[in-house]
Amino acid sequence: MKYAWMDEYCLSKKGAQKDFKEEWQATRYMIGGKMFVMQGGDKYGTPIATVKLEPTFGRFLREQYKDIVPGYYMNKEHWNSLYLEGDVPDDVFRDMLDQSYAIVLSSLPKSVQKELEA
């Protein structure tokens, strides 16, 4: 896998946890019980990572990179999938992961956010 650093990077985020959803055959990275990254495969088994982004930023990235597509099996407006064997630069992917984490963190109750930040 091109982005071998992804697992360690996701787990380095405050409060991040990882599990494997058997029925989806996917690894999920979550914060406060909500998913911010899912790593699995498309219908052909090609490895992908799916992240939550602001809709306008997601559309912008999809226009810039052929390896970023609307979220596979997810809400196509808010979720975007990146082909892990593609040509998206590491720094762009890191930014996508950071933004997904921030969006999900901000959706958690304020008490949970303060707990995670402590």
Image (cartoon, rainbow, N blue to C red):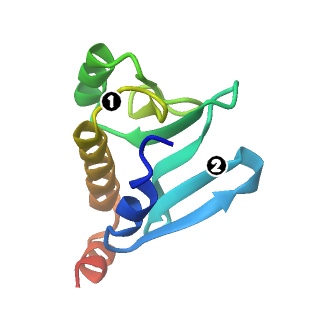
Query: Along the line of sight, which residue is nearer the eye, 69 or 32?
Result: 69
Seen as rendered, the residue at the extreme bottom is: 118
Answer above or below: position of 8 versus 52. Answer: below
66 lies left or right of 17: left
Q: Quadrant of residue 15?
A: bottom left
Pointer 2 local density, CA inside 10 Å: few below 14, some 14–19, many at least 20: some
Label 2: element kind = strand
- Identity, as a three-letter code, of the amino acid under mark 1: Val
Residue occupying image coordinates x 23% and y 85%: 118
Query: Along the line of sight, which residue is nearer the eye, 109 or 67?
Result: 67
Q: Which mark is residue 51?
A: none
Residue 95 rendering spot, x and y as whole percentages: 24, 44
Residue occupying image coordinates x 29% and y 21%: 59
Residue occupying image coordinates x 48% and y 36%: 84
Query: Along the line of sight, which residue is nearer the eye, 45 or 32?
Result: 45
Q: Which mark is residue 88?
A: 1
Residue 80 rendering spot, x and y as whole percentages: 42, 31
Q: CA distance from mark 2 to mark 1?
A: 21 Å
Q: What number of labels is visible?
A: 2
Q: Nearer the viewer, mark 2 or mark 1?
A: 1
In this figure, which residue is indicated by the disc labeled 2? 26
Seen as rendered, the residue at the extreme right is: 23
- Identity, as a three-letter code, of the amino acid under mark 2: Ala
Label 1: element kind = loop
3 lies left or right of 97: right
Q: Quadrant of residue 45?
A: top right
Residue occupying image coordinates x 42% and y 22%: 67
Pointer 1 local density, CA inside 10 Å: few below 14, some 14–19, many at least 20: some
Q: Earlier in the sequence, mark 2 or mark 1?
A: 2
Q: Do callouts 2 and 1 mark residues in contact (Cβ within 8 Å)?
A: no
